[in-house]
Amino acid sequence: MSDTSSQHTIVMVGQTPVETWGARRFEGRIAAVTGAARGIGRAVAERLIAEGATVYCLDLRAELLEETWNGVDRAVTIATDVGDSAAVDAAFERIRAEHGKLHVLVCNAGIPDHPKRAKDFPGDPEPATIDDETWEFVLRVNLTGTFNCIRAGVPLIRAVGLEGGAIVNLSSVAALHPSPLAVPYPSSKAGIIGMTHAFAALLGKENIRVNAIAPAATDGAMMPEDKEYLATLTAKQPIDRLVPPSEMAANIVYLCSDEAQFITGQTVSVSGGMVM
Amino acid sequence: MEPMNDKHVHDIQPIHYPVQVGDVLVETWGMHRFEGRVAAVTGAASGMGEAVVQRFLAEGAIVYALDLSQEKLDRMWGGVEGVTSIAVDVADSASVNAAFERIRAERGGLHSLVTAAGVADSPSRMNAEGGHSPAHLSTIDDESWNFVIGVNLTGTFYCIRAAMPLIQATGAGGAIVTISSVGAFAPYPLPAAYPASKAGVTGMTRAIAALVAGENIRVNSVAPAATRTAMLPTDEALLDSLLALQPIPRAIPASEMAASIVYLCSDEAQFMTGQTVHINGGMVM
């Protein structure tokens, strides 16, 4: 049997070809994506733009943000530290002033460890090495940062009305699968699941959906170059490969779309079967 | 739009990218993910299976529609382009094997299998419209238990077993989606055979996902809450009590279920396997 002629549709977003399969689920919609300069956040913003959205791209790394999004249609950059609630409030105030509402919020900004210890996974898991500053920093960016953005984003999502809106938070397979990582990261990512449940229960009647994605190791997102280490991670997956950010983005954007209108409070594990 | 707390609000949303399938307009959002692909759907003469067939067709698939009654299949799919209907009893392995042998003979392979055939209870216990009847244990006789397990759990196994060689024959991988239920995850006093069969489907989904992942074949499941099909409880008090457990307190349109099922079959979900996607308005998180 010959393989298929499935209809691929490539949309250029800046210099990036984005597969959409022809979907146009976000025409005229406003989205905000944190951690949008690189990795999964960038891929989510690209997919949303490819399907017609105007996307506010938030990231701490102002230069990278400009480098990625400068000159891209319907991408608006705001340099923001999600761990700083005043900065977050200011960013969402700008979105309010410019559009008055927000349909989609993807809370993707996150770090694997304190940068003084490790830029990438796995970090030093020995508890004695995890000082207060490290613990507080990782929790502040990953967990408090997600809360800051949802708190600032909800009034704008409410302004959409009963048409509804969607929030997707980035948890991690590290919150679900036992693995000897430095503990601030899995702790923060498990906290995101609890937060997702609570906000989903709170906002369901307003037709605002809140879900989480729990990715396995994603290529180019916080992952070290060390091929041997990466191989030990993917070997735990029945689908034994490193997933590209664009595939993770496809799943996140699906949860943001009207295709998933009755899915709320869920943590979808996109992990090649590492967690079932 | 009408108030969200009215369970009777239907999915009268505007259809943005309508594709005509028979007499029905199907929302595709412009997607064509299944051009030239072959899909088989059980329980395809009504409800969720029917909606899945419609969505597959709208996105370009060639679909085998399987259900118990040829008459019902003909009424639903007669004259609709792209559909071949086959009468099959999923609880009868010989019947299932014959159906998939026919697909093999005609197409040589299969890309997607959706096992949507299922029953709420045995016919002897169901109310006139097909919903659940009360749950007292002593009323569930051997025949009722075996019937529900036979269709929902064993039937799902028979179909996956028969379809697997066809999916392997594509050489390009494929996807299977099984139907579990929120009843397998939420403690609710349904007649026990139904949640038992649906929890079994979840276990089977994981085991087969782990088995065939290396062949690029994905196996996932969806666990719906009350969906607007013939299996929706007709007892208003029961339905109200179920919907009250959902933060989004509405019965789910079958087309919404189909959107998620077909998504899991698509290449968009290439890295998802062994998962149960809960589509329940938040009833179970």
Image (tube, coloured by chain):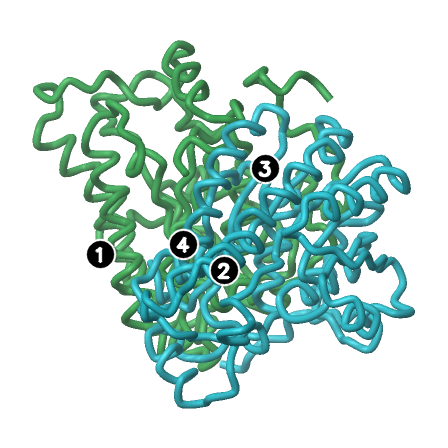
Q: Colour of chain B?
A: green
Residue A232 percent coordinates (x, y)? 35, 82
Which subunit holds the residue at mark 1?
A: B
Q: Nearer the viewer, mark 1 or mark 3?
A: 3
Q: Position of residue B116 (x, y in %)?
A: 40, 46
Q: Between residues B252 and A105, which one lies in front from this camera angle?
A: A105
Contact between marks 1 and 4 (CB within 8 A): the answer is no
Q: Amino acid at mark 2?
A: Glu
Kindly identify which residue carries mark 4. A187
Look at mark 3 in the image and give the residue it sits on.
A209
Judge if badges 3 and 2 mark residues of a common chain.
Answer: yes
Q: Are marks 1 and 3 in contact (CB under 8 Å)?
A: no
* Horizontal side of residue A31 vs B109, given as left or right: right
Q: Confirm whether residue B19 shows in the render.
A: yes
Q: Which residue is mark 2?
A: A133
Q: How dense is the environment of label 1, judged by Cα within 10 Å: few (below 14), some, or many (20 and up)?
A: some
